[in-house]
Image: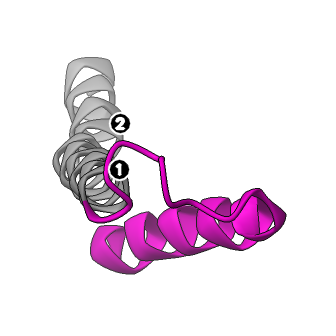
Amino acid sequence: MAAAANKLRLLGTLSYVHPTVIGIIASAVLTLLVIVGSRNLEHFDSALFGYTIASVVAFGAIVFR
């Protein structure tokens, strides 16, 4: 009985691994696109840095869900 409970608990924690990895990859791709689109941050407005970070995190969260 304990082995079955441990297996169920393990499956419950593993179910978040795949979406987490996909969310991190999506955030990394968006970050790469920001860097490429701003020509290696040459044309990046530093006043909008907070909005950029918030957008990357929100995008990763949306992809996770």
Q: Is residue 51 above or below residue 27?
A: below
Residue 48 vs residue 4, the one in the foreground = 48
Image point (28%, 30%), residue name: 10
Q: Amino acid at mark 1?
A: Ile
Instruction: Report if residue 40 lies within the magenta region.
Output: yes
Q: Secondary structure at mark 2?
A: helix
Q: Secondary structure at mark 1?
A: helix
Residue 53 vs residue 22, the one in the foreground = 53
Image point (29%, 74%), residue name: 63
Q: Is residue 43 left or right of residue 3?
A: right
Judging from the image, the colouring scheme is one colour
Q: Position of residue 46 (x, y in %)?
A: 75, 57
User: What is the CA distance from the residue labelled 1 to the residue labelled 2?
Assistant: 40 Å
Instruction: State the quadrant of the C terminus.
Output: bottom left
Q: Which residue is mark 2?
A: 9
Label 2 packing within 10 angstroms: few (<14), some (14-19), many (20+): few
Residue 1 vs residue 57, the one in the foreground = 57
Q: Position of residue 25 (x, y in %)?
A: 21, 47
Q: How many dots with numbers?
A: 2
Image point (20%, 29%), residue name: 7
Residue 30 vs residue 9, the one in the foreground = 30
Q: Which labelled disc corresponds to residue 35?
A: 1
Residue at the farthest top position: 3
Q: Amino acid at mark 2?
A: Arg
Q: Main secondary structure of the magenta part?
A: helix
Q: What span is in magenta?
A: 37-65
Instruction: Report if residue 13 lies within the magenta region.
Output: no
